[in-house]
Image (cartoon, helix red, strand yellow):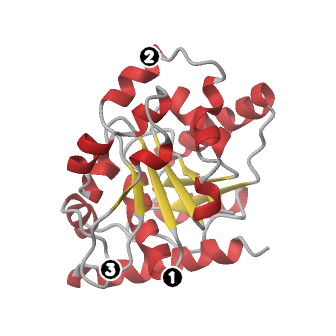
Amino acid sequence: MARIITLASGKGGTGKTTVAFHLAAALAHLDRWVLVIDLDPQGSLTFASQVQAAAKENGTVTDVFTGRKTLEQVIVQRASAPEMPTFDIVPANGRLSDWEFKYDRPAWHSILNHDLARAKEKYDFILIDSAASIGILMINALFASTEVIAPIPPEPMALPGINRIRGIMRNVDRSFHHTIDEFRILLTRYNADRPTTKTTEDLVREKFPDTFRTVIRDSALLPRITGDGVTVFEDFYGRNQAQSFDQLARELMRMGQK
């Protein structure tokens, strides 16, 4: 049975999609079957995975929400370097934003959860790259998940995003009787030379002891290779970041053994 994990930030610029992309690759390198679901109308994860052409032919997550297709029908495999492990993806595009404003299906909060029923049996991990805005799409992601990872940079301005996510989690619990079992923060864009990094990190770890020990360090390389559609495991210069994502994947797997 898959562990279903939503990556949620409550604001843009946290590295959420970058984490989803490279964490999926890291888990695949550890011989895990991984599905990532792009639930952001910007489609950044779809672009990074370079599956836009397949999305045009097979459909996107919007077709799942509208009932035109099943989840299985829109899953595509990300092409990787020869003999490199890879992952599957459910792509998205701007049509997803149109659906969010025009949804008319009953039980709208549980559409994704319902359509994941068969996929849960096939994969070890299902990662959902949620929209940054708090709305119908994030509620669907949270209702389908048992775990949440909140990537945030260790900056004071990023802290309110944590409260927004936890607030919507409480609303999902009260309104739809669904409780998230695990909530963990991942520190991203980590730069020890910034004056506020250590104080913010200490504050976060004190308030949220389950925060990942692994941090994703700030790097100009990471967004570049992500934009090029290459994982840190496929780029020669990404080796240092590959080590961080490998550690993150292993830490995530250990947490699931508690």
- State the residue position of label 1: 30
Q: Between tags 1 and 3, which lies in front?
A: 1
Identify the amino acid type marked 3: Phe
Identify the amino acid type marked 2: Phe
Determine whether, in the image, residue 206 is placed left or right of residue 238.
right
- Where on the picture, by quarter, is residue 12? top left
Indicate the position of residue 2 as horizontal and vertical percent values. 64, 62
Determine whether 226 is above or below 10 in the image: below
Determine whether 167 is above or below 148 in the image: above
Please rate how many residues cluster around mark 3, counting C-alpha atoms within 10 Å: few if below 14, some from 14 to 19, many from 20.
many
Please rate how many residues cluster around mark 1, counting C-alpha atoms within 10 Å: few if below 14, some from 14 to 19, many from 20.
some
Indicate the position of residue 19 as horizontal and vertical percent values. 43, 61
- State the residue position of label 3: 233
- Residue 249 visible in rendering: yes
Residue at position x 56%, y 39% in the image? 160
Cα distance in 3D space between marks 3 and 2: 38 Å
Residue at position x 47%, y 80% in the image? 246
Could you tell me which secondary element the residue under label 2 belongs to?
helix
The mark nearer the N terminus, 3 or 2, is 2
